[in-house]
Image: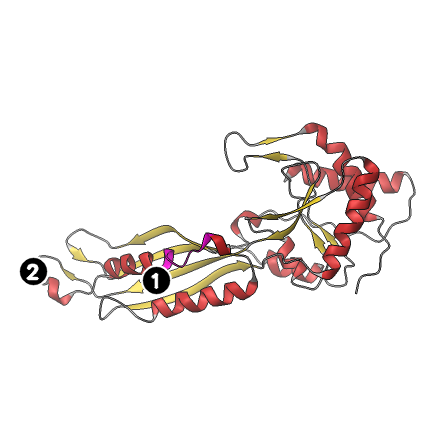
Amino acid sequence: MKPGLTMGLFAIQALQALQLPHRAIRMLVITDEEKIHRDSTADQAIAQAAQGADFALNLEGSAALNQVTTTTRGGMIVEVAIQGQAAHSGAAPEAGRSAILELAHQIIQLEALSDLTAGLHVNCGTITGGSSENIIPDFAKTQLGVRFKTNAQREHLLAQIQAIAATPTVAGTQTTVTVKTKIDSLEPTTDSQTLLQIADQHAQAIGIGPLAAIASGGASDAGIIAAQGIPTLDGLGIVGGKAHTKDEFAVVESLLPRTQLIAALLQTTHQFN
């Protein structure tokens, strides 16, 4: 992420130093995209800042010099909380309604909603519940990491999650589903394809084209901007790989040509719909 910020700033400085004509530029620096803005209102700020923009470039990294991202999956963090009935597990187990047992049943159903071929994934990333081994647990919850290719899939997934919650296996338990945060998917449009063609022309002139359009399995703030009807390209930052591992790397030699591509795109005068 940090090389992308540096590249964006240097591209703007280059245009200023060369006194080249360009549009007014708005650069957004967002620090909590990895958490899908769970603890902030950054998603709303991004959507607001995007209003009136001609197009948008997201400077996340890319796997190859001639690649840009035109499709990203969207994501949600969904909390599924179960309310049961506490009871002494030795003296009166029949009086209890185990929230953990109900959650266990639901987790199996929730994870079964995943369809990797269709780009859908539901991951029960954390679970909490109960207070003691001799008490029937009256509370349990899981945080779901949900991924989808299209926003229509998101709505369908949410409806399925709510349907599972509404049909408990353990009688006497109740489930609450709360969407803690969400981010839209980046879906190609006619205007974004035009922007890609413009980027390809610049890339070939620089010597790093033709460009290949790829789909990313991760979520991106580009989806928030694209949802506002703004033509958007993603993955215009530094070349690298193995993100979120101890072996994560970036290719220094990609800094200059990719920054040249960004600067060239910032001069685009095409009028989008």
Q: Which of 232 and 140 is in front in this view?
A: 232
Question: Which region of the structure is painted magenta?
Answer: 110-116
Are the two marked residues, 2 and 1, in contact with CB atoms closer than 8 angstroms? no
Please give the residue where the numbered disc 2 appears in the rendered image. Answer: 91
Residue 90 higher or lower than 257, as above or below: below
Can you give x and y, in whole percent of width and height, for residue 136 in the image? 18, 59
> In the image, is residue 74 part of the stretch drawn in magenta?
no
Q: Residue 72 carries which label?
A: none
In the image, residue 86 sits, relative to residue 132, either above or below, namely below
Residue 49, image quadrant: bottom right
State which tag comes first along the sequence, 2 or 1.
Answer: 1
**Which residue is painted at 50% across and 30% down in the image?**
246
Residue pictured at 82% horizontal, 45% vertical: 201
- Residue bearing mark 1: 81
Q: What residue type is labelled 2?
A: Ala
| Location of residue 135 (image quadrant) | bottom left
